[in-house]
Image (cartoon, rainbow, N blue to C red):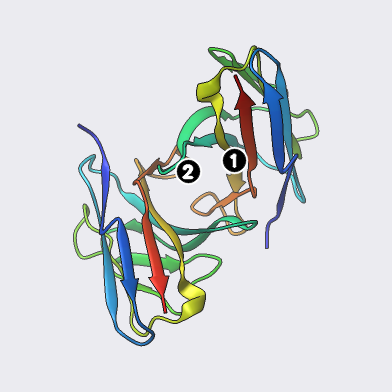
């Protein structure tokens, strides 16, 4: 089944403790992206990647890192999480150039205390 | 950055009613996308629009790409309880097609 898989689905952590949210897609998609969803703010893009070893900042990249060493994986790294990063995170992928429709994962709900 | 204004923020309707929501942008778009997010899940694409004036249907859903290229509309006819969710419009962000910007969503509640 074609899908985008995020792990974990839920995560509670403390301020300053590094964490990684994994994202994997099995559709051989070139484009991958991370979004955060907050009440009243909708979905905001954190980082995106056009292809392996190519990443770029979205609208809210501060406090996050990403890497794209392999086509299928696009982990989101929070080196020193803070409470304002408490949010619902979505990974998404699409086939390639242009505004191709995105396939989303089921989300990771992160709480930073 | 690019902004999308989506309205209404929320809607409470009775089963069987028709629904209309819209999205406006601060600049001209060449693509409009409409997504639906069911509770506890990621958004799923409903309809994609690529041409000004285009009217596209997907079952009971119909979306239109506004002729000014700065707006788009989504209509749902004869709503049913499973239409509940958050509907997002989306379009190209500043800097080109690799950045997608989303509206803040319209939360739909359908009373049986």
Tell me the quarter of the picture where residue B63 sits.
top right
Which of the pair A51/A111 is nearer the observer? A111
Quadrant into which the N terminus of chain B falls: bottom right
Q: Give the residue pinned by disc 2.
A: A98
Which of the pair A112/A28 is nearer the observer? A112
In which chain is the residue bearing label 2? Answer: A
Tally of marks: 2
**For the view shown, which residue lies furthest in the right direction?**
B68
The image shows residue B23 at horizontal and vertical percentages of 72, 39
Q: Give the residue pinned by disc 1.
A: B88
Residue located at (68% from left, 42% from top)? B29
Residue located at (75% from left, 36% from top)? B71
Which of the pair B111/B105 is nearer the observer? B111
Q: Mark 1 falls on what kind of element?
A: strand
Which of the pair A57/A76 is nearer the observer? A76
The image shows residue A49 at horizontal and vertical percentages of 37, 59
The image shows residue A69 at horizontal and vertical percentages of 20, 65
Q: Mark 2 falls on what kind of element?
A: loop
On screen, residue A37 above or below A78: above
**Left or right: A49 with respect to B45?**
left
The image shows residue B82 at horizontal and vertical percentages of 50, 23
Quadrant into which the C terminus of chain B falls: top right
Is the residue marked by circle 1 packed among few (<14), some (14-19), or many (20+) residues within 10 Å? many
Residue located at (78% from left, 28% from top)? B67
Tell me the quarter of the picture where residue A43 sits.
bottom right
On screen, residue A50 above or below B70: below
Tell me the quarter of the picture where residue A82 sits.
bottom left
**Left or right: B106 with respect to B70?**
left
Q: Are marks 1 and 2 on the same chain?
A: no
Is the residue marked by circle 2 packed among few (<14), some (14-19), or many (20+) residues within 10 Å? some
């Amino acid at each position: 089944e074609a899908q985008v898989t995020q792990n974990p689905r839920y995560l509670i952590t403390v301020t300053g403790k590094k964490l990684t949210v994994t994202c994997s897609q099995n559709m051989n998609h070139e484009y991958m992206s991370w979004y955060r969803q907050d009440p009243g703010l909708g979905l905001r893009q954190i980082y995106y990647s056009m292809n392996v070893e190519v990443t770029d900042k979205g609208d809210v990249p501060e406090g996050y890192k990403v890497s794209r060493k392999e086509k299928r994986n696009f982990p989101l790294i929070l080196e020193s999480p803070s409470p304002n990063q408490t949010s619902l995170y979505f990974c998404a992928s699409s086939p390639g150039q242009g505004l191709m429709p995105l396939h989303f994962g089921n989300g990771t709900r992160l709480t930073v205390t | 950055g690019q902004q999308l204004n989506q309205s209404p923020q929320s809607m409470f309707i009775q089963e069987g009613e028709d629904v209309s929501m819209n999205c406006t942008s601060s600049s001209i778009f060449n693509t409009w996308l409409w997504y639906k997010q069911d509770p506890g899940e990621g958004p799923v694409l409903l309809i994609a629009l690529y041409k000004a004036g285009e009217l596209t249907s997907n079952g009971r859903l119909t979306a239109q790409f506004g002729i000014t290229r700065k707006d788009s509309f989504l209509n749902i006819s004869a709503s049913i309880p499973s239409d509940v969710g958050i509907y997002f419009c989306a379009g190209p962000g500043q800097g080109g097609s690799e950045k997608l910007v989303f509206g803040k969503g319209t939360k739909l509640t359908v009373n049986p």
